[in-house]
Amino acid sequence: MENFILKMDNIQKEYFGNKVLKGVKLHVAPGEIHALMGENGAGKSTLMNILFGMPVIHNTGGFEGTIEFNGEIVTIDNPQKAMELGIGMVHQEFMLIPGFTVTENIKLGREISTPTVASGVFGKSLEKLDKETMASDTRKALDTIGLDVEEQAMVGGMPVGYMQFIEIAREIDKSDMKLLIFDEPTAVLTESEAERLLETMQSLAAKGIAIVFITHRIDEVIQVTNSMTVLRDGQFVEHLQTKDTTAAEIAQLMVGRKVEKLVDDDGEDTRNIKADDIVLSLKDFHVDMPGEKVKGIDLDIRRGEVFGIGGLAGQGKVGVPNGILGLFPSAGEIVFDGEKIDTTKLGDALKKHIAFVSEDRRGVGLLLEESIQNNITFTAMQIDDKFLKKYGPIRLYDNKKARAHALEMIKQLDIRCTGPDQLAGRLSGGNQQKVCLARALTMNPKLLIVSEPTRGIDIGAKKLVLELLAKMNREEGMTVIMVSSELNELRSLCDRIAIVSDGKLTGIFTPDASDAEYGMAMSGAKGGNE
Amino acid sequence: MTKEKFKKAIDVIGLPRLIVFCFFIAIVLTAYFNDIDVPSYFSSTIKYWGMWAVLVLAMIPTIKCGIGPNFGVSLGIVCGLLGTLLAIEFHITDVVNGMLPGFGPWASMGFAIIISIATAWLVGVGYGRVLNMVKGSEMTVTTYIGYSIIYLSCILWFRAPFGAPEITWPLGGKGVRNMIAMDGSFGYLLNDAWGFYIGGEKGIFIPTGLVLFVLGMCAIVHLYFKSKTGLAIQAVGANPNFAKASGIDADKMRIKGVAMSTILAAIGIVVYTQGFGNLQAYTAPLQMGFICVASILIGGATTTKASIIHVIIGAFLYQGLIIFTPPVSNKLLAGTDISDTMRQIIQNGVILYALAKAKGGSSNE
């Protein structure tokens, strides 16, 4: 029987009827670096929130399962409790106060103080800070991780890498730290900083602190970890020793082949797609979209195909359509059907009949306070002057025509609503997405770009949306670009799938490429079988 | 009625509108039972409603394009005053009367409106550019601009090289005088046009021309917001990101909305001036922005949603209160000047209420 510092067993968690963890276990031995791996939405963050006793867990009905820490069954219902037990967490987003010094940040809430006259009367909050001890403690923590920074320096304005290390110093300064969680710590670091961080983790582990390392970079996992747990769709997949496995195997476990079929595609494929008939071509395409930067992509989309763009969140796949539509500044060349698209001119892509369904349905995709009819007809009216009636020199909104079209769309797409006057904000996610699609189809697009078409909608609606896309492609010959984080979805519908990692294309695959190939491409390795 | 239903009804009508409406009814009843000449005060209310309605209408475009109520209508007001002054300066009334007798005042007012629209459009575009630079704090900035432009206009009026004797100071010299009679140009033009009494000479006077003009302006604004540009402006106000994804330049639409608001304000002051019979220069329009904002809010608008009906109801309730309160308070509380205090409390209270109800910033881009 192996000795474990942390044993989480049979953890189950539901968010509003949606099961996100289905009997997960996580076992970590003292002094080891344990990787927790999985795609976006695999349940990594939820599992760590449970371990850290975050309020979001207990506000949504708690969880099931047991946590055994240091040999004892524990209940962790708030973060303070977790800290008392010796569990620390280095957050993905920095929780530092820019106007405070390094020492103040590290010691915040745990200040060392000495009694004074005033504190004798009014209580502990008026005790005097023992600045010297605090500074020397801080120094010790900073030295442990090898960060050469003044303990009295202001945090504001420091490089991102430094902030990450200060976060770590804060955690290890807490006495009796037994387990430290790193939530994607290398995502924001430069290569050399990441290297240093990995070294730091190793030296901490050598001191007997167990580390849970959340990441999706397989090379880092191979480099520093001792063992790992792989999750997929809220399910426990495997507990592995790093030395017994390979990068390809990890990638395959992460992506996995799911059995459910998302599109019933029994119709015969009569499409004739030619490799040299290019409808859209991107050359050295850059997009400056915060959080989804695209750093130089070359792509050729064939007429009549369904082209998928996949990759992990934050790697730039979503930036591609937003750049083409001119919603974020971009550089490089876009040629659509022989014409160049000027992304500095807002709406140029729309005018050339490229329709776009945004990934941010409620923020960008809909006018929540407006009727379904207005939502469906708006873009076509603005771009193509549809639904306008001429009265002499002025053109007014043609309510009759718009209503007829809205009713037609509601019927065709099976939008469940009380009528075209219902406010879009009152619809369910799936029906809202159909309204977005209806608006795009109203444009009579030559190219339809859908971004995360199934995000936040239930499985039934998901299938309907995907089938609709398939129908548009098969029957109307519409070229479709589908951007999605769900590889399974892309594979069930697309002819070719491009994987984007760190703003660059890592490969174009056929849907039947192996899981390992996809997994490697998602974690940044070049590949491709197309 | 259950408590919930009651609450819902109040939500629909809006608490301030309800309070003001009840207060108005109470005042009118009090007036009636205290032998105050209610019909004549009603006539005044209708007249002032017409004089203010176009100015209040100027709130609609800025609210619809997401900027919120335009405290800076004074910019348009100054443009409208300039147009009116030029119409007087060039004696348009006399010149046209010489050619087409009887058409002089109409030509004069038309001239004033055209000049006003032209200057207001230019000024409005600049004003819109400024407001695009201060997204998120438009209401504060419009208030500052509204105040400061009035003082800037004081310098203009003081130094402007007008020559017509009606405009310059009676003792001679340059500059515009405080109050200029409109008798020789287009004073009372709309008010008197096709006017008639309901219930004889002692009854209620209906200024038909004014009412028709106001309704015409309302119709124009209503139709504008059914046009392609109008709908685009509303989309920008509702969700700038959505508008952007539909290929609409949000900043441009905001400028259009502001320019339109300024133009409406300019036309509004021309209408106001003809009804008042005198052109008031210098600091007279200082509070007009606040009155316009308060009126539309009393009418049921919020800082993000407004319609023509809010303008019509709001202007009527506000003016009705202003006109009925003094005689009633003089009768009941002789020797006090409670009416202006009431006006201030209602006007600023309603603005405060609406701002407290507003959710978040006016710009969510």
Image: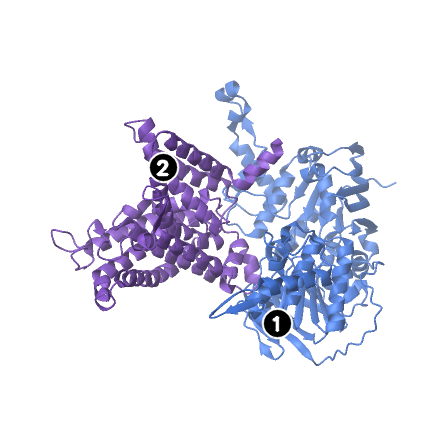
Disc ID at residue A367: none
Q: Is residue B253 visible?
A: yes
Badge 2 crowding class, 10 Å Cα cut-off, few under 14, some 14 to 19, many 20 or more, is some
Given the current orientation, which residue lies at the most extreme left position? B171
- Residue A475 lies, in percent from the top left, at 75, 72
Callout 2 amino acid: Val
> Which chain has been coloured blue in this picture?
A
Residue B117: where, in percent of width, then height? 35, 61
A225 displayed left or right of B332: right
Q: Is residue B220 left or right of residue B192?
A: right
Residue situated in front as seen by the camera: A113 or B365: B365
In this view, B130 is above or below A481: above
In the rendered view, tell whether residue A308 sits above or below residue A77. Answer: below
Name the amino acid type tagged 1: His
Q: Is residue A127 visible?
A: no
Could you tell me which quadrant the N terminus of chain A lies in? top right
Q: Chain of mark 2?
A: B
Q: Residue at x 72, y 69 (%)?
A: A307
Provide the residue designation for mark 1: A353
Residue toward you, A444 or A351: A444
* Residue B127: x %, y % from top left: 38, 57
Q: Which residue is mark 2?
A: B38
Where residue A47 sits: x, y (%)? 74, 44
Please name the residue shown 80% across and 38% down the image.
A64
Q: Nearer the viewer, mark 1 or mark 2?
A: 2
Give the left or right position of residue A221, taking residue B190 as reference.
right
The purple one among the chains is B
Q: Residue A447 occupies which quadrant of the picture? A: bottom right
| Residue drawn at x 43%, y 53% as measured from the top left | B134
